Image (cartoon, rainbow, N blue to C red):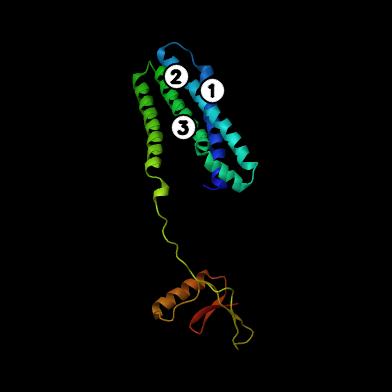
């Protein structure tokens, strides 16, 4: 990872962790402890608040370290403290899972008098939790690092535009990148390319010079 990747990772994690922690904290004030389900939900909410707050604060500390030093030194320091750099994300995942579990328990307790709605809310909540867990596992097993980038196609272009003058009055021809055609192309393909070039080119007309199609300025 480079400097920008380390910095952006801390910013993104800290912001989202603070958001989730605020949601979890808001649920605490409205919860009444009347059953074991309520107590479990309350404990999970407290855990989510602590984990997300810890994630946001550690992200802020690491962000300050990265931005207050030279880029090369900051990247070298981050490489030597790889586990510490990942700690905010781990705490964020912990707090998020606790928050999702809290929502499931809250909905179960609140809809105790409505069995069908209770079951529906729990099913949707479990599906959300499993989606988050499944996505995390997939990204761990099938990481982009295991893929090889496809070779880039190299296009050789002239160092600068070449002006080609021709004794045709006041007109001047200038080679236009992307308009050069192979002399071995068939007449039909040349006509199709010329029509396409004429419709999309910013020049008024085109002309062929030494087997190369150029735009008339």
Residue that numbered label 3 is attached to: 93
SS label for mark 2: helix
Quadrant for the C terminus in the image: bottom right
Quadrant for residue 15, please give it. Answer: top right
According to the image, label 2 marks what residue? 41
Q: Which of pointers 3 and 2 lies earlier in the amino acid sequence?
A: 2
**Where residue 50 sits in the image (x, y, percent)?**
53, 24
212 shown above or below 95: below
| 176 to 170, vertically: above or below | above
Q: CA gap, disc 1 to disc 2?
A: 12 Å
| Mark 1 neighbour density, 10 Å: few (under 14) some (14–19) many (20 or more) | some
> Is residue 17 shown to the viewer in this render?
yes
Give the quadrant of residue 166: bottom right
The residue closer to the viewer here, 191 or 87, is 87
Residue 150 drawn at (x, y percent): 41, 58
Residue position marked by numbered label 1 in the rendering: 25
Farthest bottom residue in view: 167
Question: Gap between marks 1 and 3, in whole Å?
Answer: 16 Å
The secondary element bearing badge 3 is classed as helix
Q: Where 165 sits versus 115, above or below?
A: below
Contact flag, marks 3 and 2 (Cβ < 8 Å):
no
Work out whether mark 1 precedes mark 3 in sequence or the reverse, and give the earlier one. Answer: 1
Q: Residue 211: x percent and y percent?
A: 48, 83
Secondary structure of residue under mark 1: helix
Question: Cα distance, mark 3 to mark 2?
Answer: 17 Å
């Amino acid at each position: 990872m480079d400097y920008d990747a380390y910095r952006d990772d801390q910013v993104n994690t800290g912001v989202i962790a603070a958001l989730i922690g605020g949601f979890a904290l808001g649920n605490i004030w409205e919860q009444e402890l009347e059953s074991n389900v309520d107590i479990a939900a309350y404990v999970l909410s407290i855990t989510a608040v602590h984990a997300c707050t810890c994630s946001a604060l550690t992200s802020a500390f690491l962000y300050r370290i990265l931005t207050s030093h030279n880029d090369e030194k900051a990247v070298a320091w981050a490489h030597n403290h790889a586990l510490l750099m990942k700690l905010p994300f781990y705490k964020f995942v912990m707090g998020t899972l606790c928050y999702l579990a809290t929502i499931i328990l809250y909905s179960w307790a609140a809809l105790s008098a409505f069995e069908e709605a209770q079951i529906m809310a729990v099913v949707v909540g479990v599906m959300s939790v499993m989606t988050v867990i499944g996505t995390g596992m997939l990204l761990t097993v099938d990481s982009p690092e295991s893929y090889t980038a496809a070779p880039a196609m190299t296009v050789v272009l002239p160092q600068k535009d070449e002006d080609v003058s021709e004794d045709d009055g006041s007109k001047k021809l200038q080679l236009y990148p992307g308009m050069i055609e192979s002399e071995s192309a068939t007449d039909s393909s040349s006509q199709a390319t010329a029509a396409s070039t004429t419709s999309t080119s910013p020049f008024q007309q085109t002309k062929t010079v030494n087997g190369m199609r150029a735009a008339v300025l």
